[in-house]
């Protein structure tokens, strides 16, 4: 057994060691953290605040702030906007809370978690932002309201136009960027943050939706024009083009726009007074210009008629109001002569009736007196009517005929029983007042074949 003296010395020695260790730790903890001090997950025991600050240092140039504009993403470097991080105030606060004489409390102290104190120089930030094209007010584009269009499926719809790049309040955006950086963020989406000026209307705005609905009601109308037996529809695009849409999406049918559609339709489809290429009985191709035959819409009257159809939402198949009507019409070739027509060859003093591309009647004739300047006018005409019998009157004559078939005012086909011969060169000095004289039997046969409105080509 140990003596009491040995035990006493042992106790004193142990206590002395403990005191010395305690005092050593006190001295050490005056300028450094307690042993085992955990800050942000790392042990910084026996480290000074200055050491920890240096260990936590982040180079401002390594910080990048991303700005997502609508057209482009820009990046700002921390060293150009006065970016810096201050941990020192937090680190000093921790050190102040650690009493050197209570260093042993480290064994039950919890780890420290500190935030970065981030600062940014607003003037430097503002300068860098002002250098960006996207922040240049002169380069910003105003947003556009939705556009009402007819899509490829002939359906009217509203489509978003240019959303623009106009930043409503650049100063507020700058302040928001500074706020995000100071809170530890490294990016901003300018659109999501709501800094762009928005268009007054969206595609789902009530006014836009109502406008689209009305436009579809009009553009989907089934309005078909009849050129003879040929059906020519007014297209969805043409119907849509008659609508005037105001800035507030108030939609109305415009009489002037309807007139523009009728005029355009007339230019595209009418044949009146337009040159035609015609293949004669002899096989020669000629151009026929003169005459009063063809199709010609009465623009003013048809404008009124179409306008009324549209505003009353009429689905209709009808003949438009024509000034002049042809006999037939082929949409693909724009041919209005067809395969049933009369042909008068002045040079050869002969006429033909074609039906289904075959000659069903031909005859020698006598046309207008050339020497007396009564030559039968060339051109393309239509049969006005037919009459039997008839009396033909002029300034110096009165002729009774059995078959009268006019096609150019007072000029037409008729029998001429007073003539003993037809064809040849009779017409040069002994021709008619302009009519096409025919033998009685041929005129009779023609009278049974010819129809009102059919084309007559004279050349």
Image (cartoon, rainbow, N blue to C red):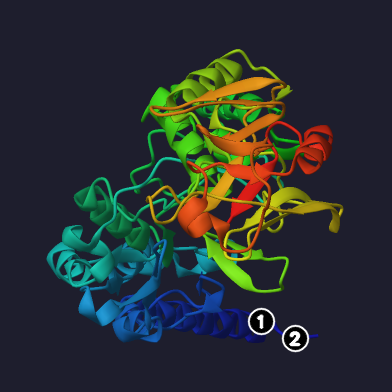
- Which quadrant of the view contains residue 455? top right
Question: Whole-percent x and y of residue 169?
Answer: 23, 46
Q: Nearer the viewer, residue 274 or 268?
A: 274
Report the residue at 23% width, 66% height from top.
120
Q: Which of the 4 image quarters holds residue 29?
A: bottom left
- Residue 10 pos. (x, y %): 62, 85
Relative to 45, residue 419 above or below: above
Which x, y percent locates residue 317? 73, 25
Q: Is residue 265 left or right of residue 50?
A: right
Q: CA distance from mark 1 to mark 2?
A: 7 Å
- Which of the numbered marks, if any, corresponds to residue 165? none
| SS at mark 2 in the image | loop
Q: Secondary structure at mark 1?
A: helix
Residue 296 x/y as whole percent: 53, 37
- The residue positioned 20% from the left and 67% from the top of the image is 125
Q: Is residue 338 left or right of residue 376?
A: right
* Residue 175 vertical placement versus 215 (above, below): below
According to the picture, the residue beneath numbered tag 2 turns out to be: 2
Q: 126 or 307, which lies in front? A: 307
Can I make out residue 242 in this image? yes
Crowd tier of the residue under label 2, counting other residues whose Cα lies within 10 Å: few below 14, some 14–19, many 20 or above: few
Q: Are marks 1 and 2 in contact (CB under 8 Å)?
A: yes
Q: Residues within 10 Å of mark 1 (few under 14, many from 20)?
A: few
Give the answer, above or below, for where 137 lies relative to 250: below
Q: In the rendered image of this protein, does residue 442 appear above or below residue 101?
A: above
Disc number at residue 7?
1
Apparent side of residue 154 relative to residue 55 in the rendered image (left or right) = right
């Amino acid at each position: 057994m140990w003596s009491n003296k040995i035990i006493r010395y042992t106790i004193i020695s142990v206590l002395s060691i403990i005191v010395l260790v305690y005092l050593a730790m006190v001295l050490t903890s005056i300028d450094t953290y307690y042993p085992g001090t955990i800050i942000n997950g790392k042990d910084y025991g026996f480290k000074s605040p200055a050491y920890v600050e240096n260990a936590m240092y982040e180079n401002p140039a390594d910080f990048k702030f991303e700005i997502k504009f609508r057209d482009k993403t820009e990046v700002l470097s921390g060293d150009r906007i006065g970016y810096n991080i201050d941990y020192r105030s937090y680190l000093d606060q921790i050190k102040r809370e650690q009493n050197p004489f209570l260093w042993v409390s480290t064994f039950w102290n919890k780890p420290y978690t500190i935030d970065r104190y981030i600062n940014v120089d607003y003037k430097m930030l503002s300068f860098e932002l002002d250098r960006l094209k996207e922040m240049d007010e002169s380069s910003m584009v105003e947003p556009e309201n939705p556009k009402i269009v007819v899509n490829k499926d002939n359906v009217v719809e509203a489509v978003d136009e240019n959303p623009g790049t106009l930043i409503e309040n650049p100063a507020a955006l700058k302040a928001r960027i500074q706020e995000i950086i100071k809170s530890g963020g490294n990016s901003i989406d300018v659109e999501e943050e709501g800094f762009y000026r928005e268009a007054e209307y969206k595609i789902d705005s009530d006014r836009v939706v109502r406008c689209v609905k009305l436009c579809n009601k009009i553009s989907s109308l089934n309005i078909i024009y009849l050129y003879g037996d040929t059906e020519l529809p007014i297209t969805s695009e043409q119907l849509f083009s008659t609508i005037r849409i105001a800035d507030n999406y108030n939609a109305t049918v415009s009489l002037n726009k309807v007139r523009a559609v009728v005029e355009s339709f007339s230019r595209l489809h009418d044949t009146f007074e337009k040159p035609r290429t015609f293949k004669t009985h002899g096989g020669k191709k000629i151009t026929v210009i003169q005459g009063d035959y063809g199709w010609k819409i009465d623009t003013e009257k048809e404008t009124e008629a179409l306008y009324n159809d549209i505003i009353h939402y009429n689905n209709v198949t009808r003949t438009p109001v024509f000034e002049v009507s042809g006999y037939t019409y082929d949409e693909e070739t724009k041919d209005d002569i067809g395969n049933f027509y009369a042909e008068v060859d002045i040079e050869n003093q002969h006429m033909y009736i074609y039906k289904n591309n075959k000659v069903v009647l031909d005859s020698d004739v006598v046309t207008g007196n050339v020497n007396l300047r009564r030559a039968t006018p060339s051109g393309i005409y239509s049969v006005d009517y037919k009459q039997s019998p008839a009396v033909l009157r002029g300034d110096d004559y009165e002729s009774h005929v059995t078959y009268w078939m006019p096609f150019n005012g007072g000029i037409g086909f008729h029998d001429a029983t007073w003539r003993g011969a037809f064809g040849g060169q009779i017409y040069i000095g002994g021709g008619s007042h302009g009519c096409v004289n025919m033998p009685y039997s041929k005129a009779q046969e023609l009278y049974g074949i010819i129809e009102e409105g059919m084309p007559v080509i004279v050349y």
